[in-house]
Image (tube, rainbow, N blue to C red):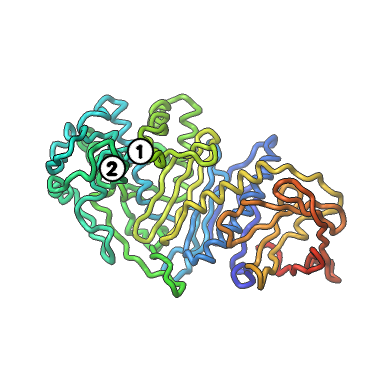
Amino acid sequence: MKAIFGAGAALAVLGMMVPAQAETGGDHHQTAAAPDDSAKAAALSEAMRAAELWVEGQRQYRKIPAISAAVAQGDRTVWATGFGTTDRAQRTPATADTIYSICSISKLFTAVALMQQWEQGKVALDVPITDYLPWAKLAADPRDSVPVTLRGALTHSAGLPRESDYPYWTGPDFPFPSQAQIRSRIGEQSPLYPASTTWQYSNLGLTLVGETVEAVSGEAFADYVSARILTPLGLDDTRPAIPTDLYGKQMAVGWGALAADGTRPAVKLFDPAGITPAAGFSSSAADLAKFASWTFRLAKSGEAEVLRPSTLREMQRVHYVSPDWNTSWGLGFSVRNENGTTVVGHGGSCPGYRSALMIAPKEEMGIAVAMNAMDDPGYLARGIAALVNARGGATAFDPVEGVKLDDYAGVYDGQPWDSDYFLVPWAGGLTWIGPDAKEPADGLWRLKPLGGDRFRVVTDKGEEREEVVFERDRAGKVVHYRQHSNFNRKVSPLP
């Protein structure tokens, strides 16, 4: 960590009352907290400080060039920033407004567009999709089946092939088909399964949903979505396209999976062409957080905005459960239970880019993560959520006169037993954060201030354990702490 978390990777301490600037390469998008929310703001500030340190650690340990992340609570974005760099020379810092391919998160916008047509009575969800797209008739199949419908396409239960019959996920050129090519080939494709019997993720299915929007609205899909969804919601950095003119500038360049030698190969930019409704949108973490806030605002206001609130509720409830009960889906939205919390949203994975949007409707919390490498943004989103929840649920220790927690906070030497780690202020005390930990909030033990430079270890179960004593140099700076007769050396202040 001495090399990884040195001055060149310094992170700003979040102040929830004023916007902050992250020296890791990103501007923060924050809004002011109300005075009576000061305790919540302080807790969120500590959680986000820990999240920044952890995400940057994950980025560097996993050699991810750029990550952008944002947290929405209710109708505001409370944290949004970027980590790393976005260009091939690795000089341009990532920000909350860095643009990435969001791939399958595109499906949420396509589903919203379709449900606008449903509200107007132009489509029905349970009639054959060929009623709207006569050319979308699959090859004959001898198995008995109910019709392929829009509901089946939105829930990935229509039995459709996963893809249009072209090798567009194959590099290095990723030859996505045009709209005309998709239409010309579909009649040669057979269903994978009888409809409504098996959950099978299908980009072809959501492409047909986008085709339906175009057919019934009489407008080009991209024009329709831009005018009826993106512009009204103020999503200025979201497009039903890849902005090639911004590539290597505001749009991050793409990188592949981590190789055995610790490098990632460069990935060529692709054109999603006819698959755009399923996988062709681009966006920023800041815009995805705005989208999450729109869903909260719509649910709370009771007033129509792009959709009726009742339509959004319909989209976010379970419409299909797989026969093994392991997968559940709404209309466009994935819907799942995570430790008792209903989480809706979507993930995205395209050549050189991964993204995740997780929304907890009841809790009014949304987390967006995007990266320009083939890695896992979902665990980063869950880790950020876990830190927010852990800090929000922590019982604060009583303040002790004269104890300044920032004196003890810092980077500590973990070698040779483990990676270096952070001690960070946490609910009136300190806690340990491992930058290489996959689950940063799992089993958080804390240090309770006793006075002077003495602290008491408190387990995640609330049990009080041994005493820890910090020691200072002649200048009065903390240099290490003593625990079980051994010393743990402080490497540097917190970045």
Q: Residues within 10 Å of mark 1 (few under 14, many from 20)?
A: few
Amino acid at circle 2: Leu
Residue 383 vertical placement versus 65 (above, below): above
The disc placed on residue 323 is 1
Please name the residue that numbered disc 2 is placed on.
Answer: 206
Q: Position of residue 436 (x, y in %)?
A: 58, 62
**Mark 2 or mark 1, which is nearer the start of the sequence?**
2
Question: Gap in Å between the C-alphas at discs 1 and 2?
Answer: 21 Å
Q: Residue 473 versus residue 394: which sits nearer the camera?
A: 394
Residue projecting furthest to the bottom: 261
Report the number of discs: 2
Q: Residues within 10 Å of mark 2 (few under 14, many from 20)?
A: many
The answer to whether residue 231 of the structure is visible from this angle is no
Name the residue at 73% across, 42% down.
Answer: 395
The answer to whether residue 327 of the structure is visible from this angle is yes
In this rendering, would 484 be left or right of 380?
right
Q: Position of residue 125 (x, y in %)?
A: 27, 30
> Picture quarter containing residue 392?
top right
Amino acid at circle 1: Pro
Q: Residue 480 versus residue 338: which sits nearer the camera?
A: 338
